[in-house]
């Protein structure tokens, strides 16, 4: 039986400066999956996540996230169910961590008491430190990225889109923060350094020449003694693409 | 509505923190200073054909163009920094972002025009007897605010399309080309009501103007319609942009 899908992408096309980066992408990510997306060329994965987050427009094709096909402004709609975190923090860094989290909560439509409860939980989980009321920029990129993730998680999203996130953090702290809780939460990570996502993902996908060349379970790499790396995933894609000789299949 | 207020508040704080709010308000207020300083005999410095009010009108035209350029640079910069993307990924419509920045700059213009108007009124002194009342100055200033709002809308349109510097320079050039000649009395066609620059022309010849309030209201109306049209276009352009 098919598991319900949190992300369904069909026939997505998009060119940038006359270069076709997405050329009919079809992807179906089940609920609760942690998918590592790598791409050739590198920018294609970020572009796909940007389109899913509403930051860029596709030239053709469609997609559904958490069962929603377009931005849904209802109280339980898009803004609470989807979250995106890019490589840059994006918000105004003259805001304090508390203000960023409060702003994220307000934009999501949470009332004051609900915001306070969620903000307190986020401060504890992400160890946002003692400088909660001074501008984020004073804490440097490390604090900025942690606050960015905390703001993305504030709404308890069903689908989390992470574009090469938290690169300023040390690997241990990064791995701790990217252990995203929630069995039904679906996470897509576009990464340039697949090895650093080991332990965080249970599926891998390679976007090659504008299409999904492979979408496989993480374990399949191990079954073929391939590492969780760009080369390993590309090799798995090549293995799958190679036709099985008739004698062997018999 | 609450999200529009949120975006407008963020825009105002960003302008305040980056000192651009001070530059915009200061430019508008400073446009009234030469008139105050040279009110006795501006012709000694500028020639017989110039009046103090004309000097103010030209300064104000330049200041309004500058505010339009600041709006262009602001939106283009926000696009590149990813702050618009952060809001859009939280389902804030792109049109609302444009409207929020427009509201912020419209408020900034008001903040500058109010003290400038008071300064001009005080500088005119007994000459105000020739006017029917403060409304004879306030309504043309309202028309100037509307012309400034149109310049801001133009800046937001170009800021949604171009990089920061080209957007700012092009906005400055286009707005100044439309406003400065009219304010200086060099382009009667641009100064004829209901052209957006007519409010500036009315200010320049305020003491002799036959119908300052009616002409200014017509000009303000056309400026606001123009600003609204350009804003719709700007929102559509931002809607197509990658953030």
Image (cartoon, grey):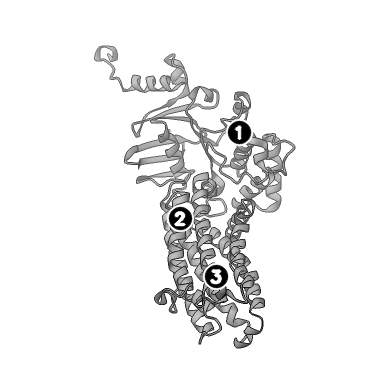
What's the residue at 55%, 81% (across, down)?
B206
The subunit letter for the residue under badge 2 reads: B
Between marks 1 and 3 in the image, the one whose residue lies nearer the viewer: 3
What's the residue at 34%, 34% (across, down)?
A210
Q: Which residue is mark 2?
A: B169
Q: CA distance from mark 2 to mark 3?
A: 21 Å
Q: Which residue is mark 1?
A: A181
Q: Indicate the quadrant where residue B35 lies.
A: bottom right
Q: Which residue is mark 3?
A: B145
Residue B157, image x and y in percent? 44, 58
**Within 10 Å of the Cα at label 2, are there few (<14), some (14-19), or many (20+) other Cα atoms?**
many
Badge 3 marks a residue whose secondary structure is helix
Q: Indicate the quadrant where residue B25 lies.
A: bottom right
The subunit letter for the residue under badge 3 reads: B
Is residue A72 visible in this depiction of the protein?
Answer: no
Q: Residue furthest right?
A: A130
Residue A70, image x and y in percent? 45, 50
Residue B72, image x and y in percent? 49, 56
The answer to whether residue B175 is above or below residue B121 is above
Residue A86, image x and y in percent? 52, 38
Residue B35 appears left or right of A235: right
Same subunit: marks 1 and 3:
no
Same subunit: marks 2 and 1:
no
Badge 2 marks a residue whose secondary structure is helix
């Amino acid at each position: 039986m098919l598991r319900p899908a949190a992300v369904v992408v069909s026939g997505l096309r998009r060119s940038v400066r006359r270069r076709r980066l997405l050329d009919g992408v079809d992807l179906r990510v089940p609920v609760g999956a942690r998918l590592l997306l790598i791409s050739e060329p590198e920018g294609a994965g970020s572009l796909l996540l940007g389109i899913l987050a509403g930051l860029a427009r596709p030239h053709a094709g469609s997609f559904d996230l958490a069962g929603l096909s377009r931005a849904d402004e209802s109280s339980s709609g898009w803004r609470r169910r989807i979250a995106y975190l890019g490589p840059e923090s994006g918000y105004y860094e003259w805001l304090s961590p508390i203000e960023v989290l409060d702003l994220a909560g307000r934009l999501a439509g949470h009332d004051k008491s609900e915001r306070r409860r969620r903000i307190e939980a986020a401060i504890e989980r992400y160890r946002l430190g003692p400088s909660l009321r001074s501008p984020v920029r004073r804490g440097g990129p490390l604090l900025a990225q942690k606050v960015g993730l905390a703001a993305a998680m504030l709404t308890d999203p069903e689908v989390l889109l992470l574009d090469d996130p938290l690169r300023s953090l040390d690997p241990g702290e990064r791995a701790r923060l990217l252990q995203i809780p929630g069995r039904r939460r679906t996470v897509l990570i576009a990464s340039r350094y697949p090895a650093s996502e080991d332990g965080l993902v249970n599926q891998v996908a390679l976007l090659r020449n504008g299409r999904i060349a492979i979408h496989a379970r993480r374990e399949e790499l191990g079954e073929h003694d391939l590492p969780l790396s760009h080369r390993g995933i590309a090799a798995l894609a090549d293995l799958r693409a190679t036709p099985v000789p008739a004698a062997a299949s018999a | 509505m609450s999200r529009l207020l949120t975006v407008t508040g963020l825009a105002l704080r960003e302008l305040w923190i980056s000192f651009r709010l001070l530059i915009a308000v200061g430019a508008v207020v400073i446009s009234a200073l030469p008139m105050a300083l040279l009110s006795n005999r501006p012709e000694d410095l500028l020639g017989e054909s110039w009046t103090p009010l004309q000097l103010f009108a030209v300064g104000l035209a330049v200041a309004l163009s500058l505010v339009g350029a600041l709006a262009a640079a602001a939106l283009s910069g926000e696009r590149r920094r990813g702050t618009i993307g952060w809001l859009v990924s939280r389902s804030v419509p792109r049109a609302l972002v444009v409207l929020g920045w427009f509201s912020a700059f419209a408020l900034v213009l008001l903040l500058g025009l109010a003290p400038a108007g008071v300064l001009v009124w005080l500088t005119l002194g007994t000459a105000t007897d020739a006017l029917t009342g403060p409304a004879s100055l306030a309504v043309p200033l309202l028309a100037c605010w509307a012309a400034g709002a149109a310049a801001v809308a133009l800046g937001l349109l170009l800021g949604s399309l171009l990089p920061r510097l080209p957007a700012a320079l092009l906005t400055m050039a286009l707005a100044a080309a439309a406003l400065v000649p009219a304010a200086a009395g060099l382009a009667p066609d641009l100064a004829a009501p209901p052209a957006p620059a007519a409010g500036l022309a009315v200010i320049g010849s305020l003491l002799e103007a036959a119908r300052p309030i009616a002409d200014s209201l017509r000009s303000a109306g056309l400026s606001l319609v123009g600003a609204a049209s350009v804003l719709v276009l700007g929102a559509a352009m931002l809607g197509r942009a990658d953030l």
